[in-house]
Image: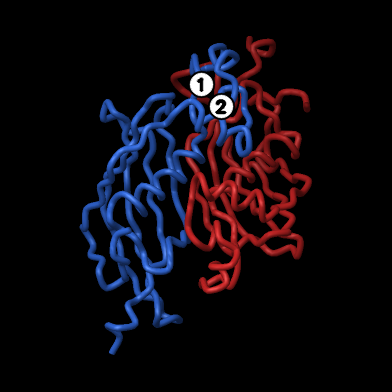
Chain colours: A blue, B red
Amino acid sequence: MSKPVYFEDLAVGQRLESSSVEMTEESMVRFSRDNDPQFFHVDPEAAKESMFGGLVGSGWQTGALTLRLLLEKSGLSFAGGVVGMDAHISWKRPVRPGDRLHIEGEITKLRASRSQPDRGFVTFRAATLNGDGETVQTIEATMLAFRDPARRA
Amino acid sequence: MSKPVYFEDLAVGQRLESSSVEMTEESMVRFSRDNDPQFFHVDPEAAKESMFGGLVGSGWQTGALTLRLLLEKSGLSFAGGVVGMDAHISWKRPVRPGDRLHIEGEITKLRASRSQPDRGFVTFRAATLNGDGETVQTIEATMLAFRDPARRA
């Protein structure tokens, strides 16, 4: 576990980069059976006849993984957890079994809450890349970040 | 299974409404263990000490469910499957165990692809509501929709 990060620890322009995680066929099928049961997400044989020519991961799995990489593998471990307010996601390329994904991004905006002095909002932009350096997804998201009670005047 | 829907079957202003699905604690914890393992998503006891005061679902699960409701329960069953291009999501309220979610929305834009005559893009806006009629999430998303080969000149 990294040290918890508070609003005060964040700066616009701060770079975010994670280690990589392999997307296995088994994890892709398991995710999609429960959450996105389309034939090109759950059936490797039938997927060959799809527009993708083979099994691809659900975009929702990539979205969730992106935030998890941010939380666990980039050192940006928010105190109180990651609470998303909104997100704008674009899915650029399919994710295929065996792809290793990592994220690269930066903090683009910080805003203190007007109504709640214990918190602020952090906006970041990040690309999720595969092992060939191709962008499979971009995201711009805003999350809650709590202030450090110890550093409040 | 509903009859497959093609680009030609869609109209701006077309209403989308789904039946509802119950979010069980078990499904919320299972999703989050794999995809979003924060304490307020996976540990009902620890979650009591969180800002939510109890277990809440992952926003990614709500996002995926919204598209699944659109696909399976609103009659908008795209030929070739649902392929998302981009999505703008806002998470408005926590989803708690026992909440029954459904979607209400409409198609806001249709655009034929310039480069690929076999397809177009459909944009919709939808709210995901709980059993009290409160909006837990809004989404505006653009997806691929194939043209019907039988109706092409």
x 35%, y 64%: residue: A122
In the image, residue A116 lies at what x, y percent? 44, 81
**Res. B121 visible in picture:** no
Residues under numbered marks 2 and 1 in contact, where contact means CB atoms less than 8 Å apart: yes
**Res. B10 visible in picture:** yes
x 62%, y 21%: residue: B80
Q: Helix, strand or loop at disc 2?
A: helix
Where residue A81 is drawn, which disc sits there?
A: none
Residue A78 shown left or right of residue B56 in the figure: left
Q: Quadrant of residue B99?
A: bottom right
Residue B116 vs residue A34, the one in the foreground: A34
Q: Helix, strand or loop at disc 1?
A: loop
In the image, residue B67 lies at what x, y percent? 62, 40
Determine whether B29 is above or below A93 in the image.
below
Label 2 to label 1, Cα distance in Å? Answer: 6 Å
Q: Chain of mark 1?
A: A
- Please, what is the three-letter code of the amino acid marked with disc 1? Leu
Q: Quadrant of residue B11?
A: top right
- Please, what is the three-letter code of the amino acid marked with disc 2? His
Q: List the residue tagged with mark 2.
A: A41
Q: List the residue tagged with mark 1.
A: A55
Image quarter in which the C terminus of chain B is found: top right
